[in-house]
Every structure is written in structure tokens, then in C-alpha cells.
Image (cartoon, rainbow, N blue to C red):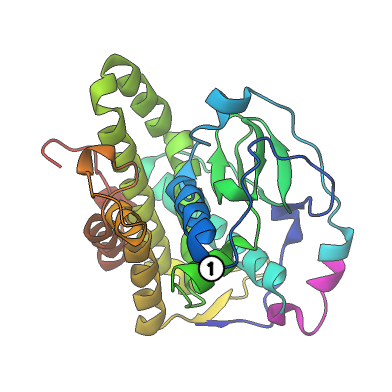
Amino acid sequence: MELNENARIDTSQVDDRRGSGGSGGMGIPIPIGGGRGGIVGIIIAVLVALVGGGFGLNAMNGGGGSEQGDNTSLQQKCSADDALQQLDCRNTAYVNSIQAYWRTALPEKFGEQYRPSRTVFFSRGVNTGCGQADSGVGPFYCPADDLVYIDLTFYRVLADQLGAEGEFAQPYVLAHEYGHHVQDLLGTEAQMRRQQQRDPDHANALSVKLELQADCYAGAWAKNATGTTDATGQKIFKSITEQDISQAIDTAEKIGDDAISERANRPVNPEEFTHGSSAQRKEWFSRGYDSGDPKSCDTFAGGR
């Protein structure tokens, strides 16, 4: 993967709240060290990571307000010559590419206009429209305020604790969360929640379908990412290789519900899955990538 150093990084698509003092409401730290306590933390963090719509936030904390960050420092950093060497600037560029893709793909494929969503960078804790959250919940999308939230230290969990070390794991994570934003815009997320209320016995199975569709949408973006451009027409990516795609697939496999259970030495129970098995996550990301078409991502079709 090679980003284009000539492309402009649009920091207006990010809300930088790191160090703003937002308090987390769950008291679950991101695990960095090993040992038994670290494994327990991993299970908590990853089982709720990559879950769009802030699952669990509403029930545990209630709705809340969102503060505003200060992007001055980020804007200066991402305008410097070495911007692409900085983790936060690279992730901002990934956000730019993902939204550039959906700005074209959503009206072309679904006949709906795309409404941009900002990504909130936070540290330790943050106030959201879905309630208070801390780093332990991992990245998530909150439909109440239409924002994606991530503490960038989450990538250390992926690399150090779960073995998902590839750089392309990062844009995959963000593309998955923006897949949830697309589901929100299309009404898929709201429809799924209504189905859960009507059929609570299959609530987990419906959640899995939502998550797998977001994986598929991430794959569709990855296929088209090298065609995305900044506001001046400069391509954001110079190249994405098959190795990069393999890294995304490897990440999808490592965060499957069965893989998480096995890592924790717990029984694998498909009825408890909320995100899908490793094989399912790999299959649906690959389906989106191979087709390059988000219309191929109907995980809710009968029999699936």
C-alpha cells in the first residue's frame, strides 16, 4: 500500500478530541500487556469492537451529548512534509478515501445521496450521542450522532495482542465502521433493530448479518480505493497490493467470534455470535472485494 504524498489530507473530516478530557462510562481499559488479565481485556474489547451503531452504549449509559474537538494541531501536522509518517494523518487520509468512494458509489448503486460522517479521534474516554464510552469498546459507529469513534491505540491491540500486524488492518477497520454509516443512511440498521425487537430470539443472528454486510462494504471500498481522489483530483492511494488485501482478510479472520472464543479458551457457541465467524468475515470481505460492488453485499437475503 502506498499513499500519495501529493494528495491533500482533509482534516475537516475528523474531529480530534484527544486530550479533551471526555470521561468514559464503562471503566474498561484497552489491554496492552499480556497475561490472564490482558486476555480478559482483549475479549471485552474485541467482542464489542467493530460493532456499528454503538451496540451496548445506549443500554448501559443512555443518550449523551457530543463535545467538539480542536483540529488545529492535527491540521498543522497533516500539512507538513512528513504527514504520511504520522498515524493520525494516515488514518485521516483513509477516511478521506472511504468517504470519496461512498460519495460516488451510494448514488450510483443505491440511488441515495451520501451524507459525510466525521471520525472522532479520542483518547481514553469520549462523550457521544449514544452515551459515554471509553477505549475498551473499540471503534464504533453511533447512529444517534452519525459519527465514527476510534481511539487509535486500538491498533496496538490488533497488532500486539491479536497478531493483525499489517498496515491495511487500519483502513479495513475504518471502512467497516463507515459501512455502518452507509447502513444507517439506507435504513438497514433501523430495519434490523426493528426485526430484533420483533424476534429477540434471533437478535444475535441479525447482528451478525449487519456486521458481515459492513465487512462486505469494506471489501467493495478496498477494490475501488485506488480510484478515490482528493478535492483537487489527486489520487489518495498510489497502489494497494494483494498483500494489503491479505492483511485485511487476516484481520477479519482474527476477530471472528469463534477465533475470539478459542483465544479465551471458551466454548465456541454460534448462537452467541454477534459479528460472525472467522470464515464468514473472510467470505464477506472477499465477496465485496472480488465484486467491487456493494450491491453484492445483501447478507439479509433469504437463506444466508
Q: Position of residue 136 (x, y in %)?
A: 59, 49
Q: Secondary structure at mark 1?
A: loop
The residue that label 1 is drawn on is 34
Q: Residue at x 63, y 66 (%)?
A: 91
- Residue at the location (59% across, 74% down)? 236
Say which amino acid is labelled 1: Gly
Q: Residue at x 50, y 36 (%)?
A: 53
Which residue range is magenta in the image? 75-85
Q: Position of residue 62 (x, y in %)?
A: 62, 22
x%, y% of residue 222? 41, 67
Of residue 128 and residue 294, the one placed in the foreground of this image is 128
Q: Is residue 174 in view?
A: no
What percent of the width, then of the height, locates residue 160? 52, 73
Is 11 placed above or below 62 here?
below
Count of numbered marks: 1
Callout 1 crowding tier (Cα within 10 Å): few <14, some 14–19, many ≥20: few
Residue 198 visible in this rendered orientation of the protein: yes
Q: Quadrant of the C terminus?
A: top left
Q: Which residue is at the front of the view, 102 or 267?
A: 267
Quick check: is 145 in the magenta stretch? no
